[in-house]
Amino acid sequence: MDQETQQKIQELQGMEQNLHNLVMQKQAFQIELTETENALGEISKSNDDVFKLVGNIMIKADKKKTEDDLTKKKDLLSLRLKSIDSEEKGLTDNAEALKKEVMAKIQG
């Protein structure tokens, strides 16, 4: 196997590692988004006081401000997930193209 092919294989391995890292990051954001959406749902059902954790203590919070903060967080997480999806698609496409190129060199 020539040097160029070996370099392409290493590049492909790097892309696969980056893709794995992106998937892990995406899962973490999806979990956080789900938790945020659940919190928003609970706040909207609540007629009572709202509390939130700050460090190791729970404090009373303004319902409207907490709702606004969670909505902003939800929007930001959604935007990050879209960005990760786009990056993941581009990386997957590039990896597939490189994989085909490497396979062609190895087989031919």
Image: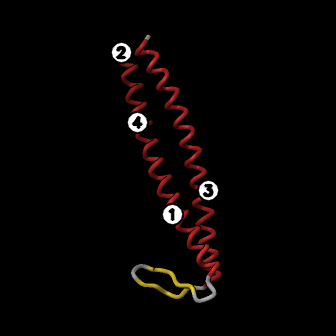
Q: Which residue is at the front of the view, 37 or 70?
A: 37
Q: Earlier in the sequence, mark 2 or mark 1?
A: 2
- Judge by depth and name the residue closer to the eye, 44 or 11: 44
Looking at the rendered image, the disc whose residue lies closer to the viewer, 3 or 1, is: 1
Residue where numbered disc 4 is placed: 14
The answer to which image quadrant residue 69 occupies is bottom right
Q: Which residue is mark 1?
A: 32
Point out the residue furthest to the top here: 108
* Disc 1 and disc 4 in contact, CB within 8 angstroms: no
Instruction: Identify whether 43 is placed above or below 33.
Output: below
| On-image quarter of the C terminus | top left
Q: Residues within 10 Å of mark 4 (few under 14, many from 20)?
A: few
Residue 2: which numbered mark, if any?
Answer: 2
Task: Say which element carries label 4.
Answer: helix
- SS for dot 3: helix
Amino acid beneath label 2: Asp
Colouring of the image: secondary structure
First in sequence: mark 2 vs mark 3: 2
Q: Percent from the top left, x then y, of residue 45?
A: 63, 80
The span from disc 1 to disc 4 (Cα, nearest Å) is: 27 Å
- The residue to which callout 3 is attached is 79
What is the secondary structure assignment of the residue under circle 2?
Answer: loop
